[in-house]
């Protein structure tokens, strides 16, 4: 049973991905909503680069903590 105090690794990963999406791409959710206007977005290349750098840095940090 998963609790808030002891989230699963998948939950941690998903929360981190959502945080990056919110901060860098201004997305409210990463869930599929089955509507083109909600599921497809345009982003500046610098925002995409920033999100990718944040994800890369998070991966690097996770690998050094493992």
Image (spheres, rainbow, N blue to C red):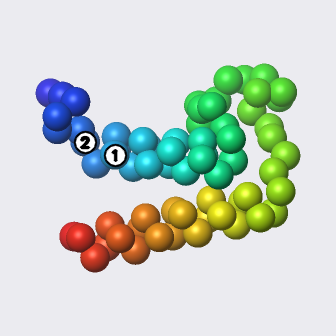
Q: Could you tell me residue 5's position as x and y percent?
A: 17, 34
Q: Quadrant of the N terminus?
A: top left
Residue occupying image coordinates x 77% and y 64%: 46
Element type where label 1 sits in the image: helix
Q: Is residue 36 something that shows in the picture?
A: yes
Residue occupying image coordinates x 51% and y 45%: 19
Q: Kindly indicate the quadrant of the structure image that contains residue 14.
A: top left
Is disc 2 in contact with disc 1, using a CB cutoff of under 8 Å? yes
Query: Going by the image, does 42 lie left or right of 28?
Result: right
Residue occupying image coordinates x 54% and y 63%: 54
Element type where label 2 sits in the image: loop
Residue occupying image coordinates x 35% and y 70%: 61
Q: Residues within 10 Å of mark 1 (few under 14, many from 20)?
A: few
Mark 2–mark 1 Cα distance, whole angstroms, equals 6 Å
Q: Is residue 2 something that shows in the picture?
A: no
Q: Could you tell me residue 12's position as x and y percent?
A: 34, 46
Question: Which residue is disc 1 drawn over?
Answer: 12
Q: Kindly indicate the quadrant of the structure image that contains residue 8.
A: top left
Q: Could you tell me residue 35's position as x and y percent?
A: 78, 23
Q: Quadrant of the C terminus?
A: bottom left
Q: Residue furthest front?
A: 23
Q: Could you tell me residue 62's position as x and y percent?
A: 32, 67
Query: Going by the image, does 62 lie left or right of 26?
Result: left
Up-down relation of residue 57 to residue 38 (above or below): below
Question: Which residue is disc 2 drawn over?
Answer: 8
Q: Residues within 10 Å of mark 2 (few under 14, many from 20)?
A: few
């Amino acid at each position: 049973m998963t609790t808030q105090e002891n989230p699963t690794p998948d939950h941690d990963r998903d929360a981190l991905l959502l945080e990056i999406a919110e901060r860098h791409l201004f997305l409210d959710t990463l869930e599929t909503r089955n509507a083109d206007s909600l599921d497809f977005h345009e982003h500046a290349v610098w925002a995409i680069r920033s999100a990718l750098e944040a994800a890369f840095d998070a991966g690097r940090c996770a690998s050094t903590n493992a």
